[in-house]
């Protein structure tokens, strides 16, 4: 699992990494590797550079299904992905959802939203 976190974090720096990160998460699921918050955060972060906001939101939904509560980092990355993809309304909706879930926003959230 730690190697997967490292791989996913490395991918977040690449422009076209979001799809590969999603495939890596799927592979981990198939092999029975327990996916955790760090894995999900890294996968969501990989969506920022490419502006793949739909994929970032999909990972957030997946976290709910896996009973992994999103963190400020998860939400910040998803908001940043929406911002990069020029989905301002979605970014603001996520920001409001953070407040509803009592997730404390960080500077990244405020700047992106």
Image: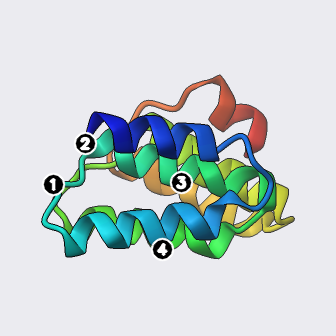
Residue 1 image label: 2
The residue furthest top is 107
Residue at the spot of label 1: 34
Measure the alpha-carbon separation of dots 3 and 1.
Answer: 17 Å
Going from N to C along the chain, the mark reached first, 3 or 1, is 1
Please state which of the two labelled residues, at mark 3 or mark 1, is closer to the viewer.
1
Going from N to C along the chain, the mark reached first, 3 or 4, is 3
Residue at the spot of label 4: 58
Name the one closer to the observer, 97 or 78: 78
Horizontal and vertical percent position of residue 58: 48, 74
The residue drawn where x is 64% and y is 37% is 109
Question: Is 20 left or right of 110, judged from the image as shown?
Answer: left
Please state which of the two labelled residues, at mark 4 or mark 2, is closer to the viewer.
2
Q: Is residue 35 above or below residue 108?
A: below
Horizontal and vertical percent position of residue 8: 50, 46
Horizontal and vertical percent position of residue 22: 49, 68
Name the one closer to the observer, 63 or 20: 20
Name the one closer to the observer, 55 or 80: 55
Please state which of the two labelled residues, at mark 1 or mark 4, is closer to the viewer.
1
Residue at the spot of label 3: 44
Measure the alpha-carbon separation of dots 2 and 3.
Answer: 17 Å
Provide the secondary structure element on which disc 4 rests.
helix
Going from N to C along the chain, the mark reached first, 1 or 4, is 1
Measure the alpha-carbon separation of dots 1 and 4.
Answer: 18 Å
């Amino acid at each position: 699992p730690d190697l997967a976190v490292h791989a996913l974090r490395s991918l977040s720096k690449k422009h076209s990494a979001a799809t590969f990160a999603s495939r890596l998460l799927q592979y981990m699921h198939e092999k029975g590797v327990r996916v955790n918050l760090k894995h999900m955060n890294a996968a969501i972060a990989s969506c920022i550079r490419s502006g793949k906001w739909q994929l970032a939101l999909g990972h957030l939904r997946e976290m709910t299904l896996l009973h992994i509560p999103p963190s400020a980092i998860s939400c910040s990355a998803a908001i940043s992905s929406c911002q990069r993809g020029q989905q301002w309304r979605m970014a603001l909706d996520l920001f409001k959802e953070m407040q509803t879930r009592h997730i404390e926003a960080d500077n990244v959230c405020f700047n992106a939203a």
